[in-house]
Image (spheres, helix red, strand yellow):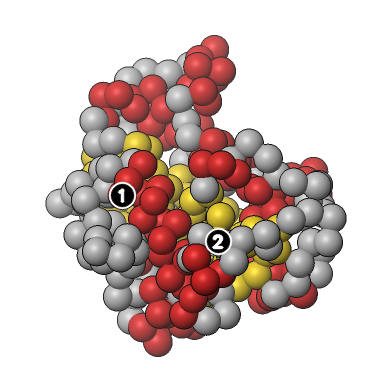
Amino acid sequence: MNQGRAEGGADGRSGYAVRLAQDTVDLKAAQRLRYAVFVEELGAKGLGADHANRLECDALDPHFDHLLLVDRAIDPRTLEHVVGVYRLLPQDRAEALGRFYSDAEYDLAPLRASGRKLVELGRSCVHPGHRRGAAMLHLWNGLADYVLSRGIEILFGVASFHGTDVVRHALALSWLHAFHLAPSSLRVRAWPDHAQAMDLMPVSPAQRAEALAAIPPLIRAYLRLGGHVGDGAFIDQDFNTTDVCLIMDTAAMSGRAVDFYTRKAPRG
């Protein structure tokens, strides 16, 4: 792992490159992918989207870094070359902006009061045609490069369950609340006007396999890294999701987990 791959290098062993967006073409390609996944595939309303041009975008996009997984075989002029994306907002840029995206859903005071260096993650998605290969591991490698090169200590952001019917997600949400609640010093809380309790049913360790199977793969990946969740879910009607706030303290990550997610990605 080295900073060059996350900042603009390519993995010569595969058809992928992992880098930050470099220009308007890259940004529009990221927004096109987000539109395809969030609006067309998952049914988001996309109130701020450019539907005519199939771009999922908002006013905060210019302030974020956009970490891209690029298929080098695709001509960028098609806006189809970006096949994976993470949207990243470093703390210093959020302070200049006056907010994180997650401020709309959660009281982030505990994170700000921690004195730790923060980055917010969001809008993560991968093109359906690349989900079964090494794409996500390439993105994880790029994210690790980004975090390590900037001395970031805490990663956080909203992650989603598809749909707004909390009963459908009762087991998964209750499991997260019972076994993965963030320590009190970092425990953000959903704003009361929109908060949905997560402890919806009793759960026991015997239900682990069933509960984990009901949790989206990306959230499970964060949990394997030692991630935790804030208190309360947020129902996002625009995106047709039930959100939880995930928090990862890099100091608390196990060495085994770090080794896995920062190793060189395989051919993919």
Rendered location of residue 155, percent (x, y): 55, 60
Q: Provide the secondary structure element on which disc 1 rests.
A: helix
The image shows residue 181, relative to residue 157, as above or below, that is above
Residue named by callout 1? 39
Total residue callouts:
2
Q: Quadrant of residue 191?
A: bottom left
Between 190 and 2, the residue placed more toward the observer is: 2
Q: Is residue 18 left or right of residue 64?
A: right
Q: Provide the secondary structure element on which disc 2 rests.
A: strand
Query: What is the C-alpha distance between the residues marked 1 and 2?
Result: 17 Å
| Residue at 32 percent of width and 60 percent of height | 54
Between 249 and 37, the residue placed more toward the observer is: 37
Lower sequence index among marks 1 and 2: 1
Between 11 and 191, the residue placed more toward the observer is: 11
Residue named by callout 2? 82
Q: Please, which residue is most extreme toward the left here?
A: 193
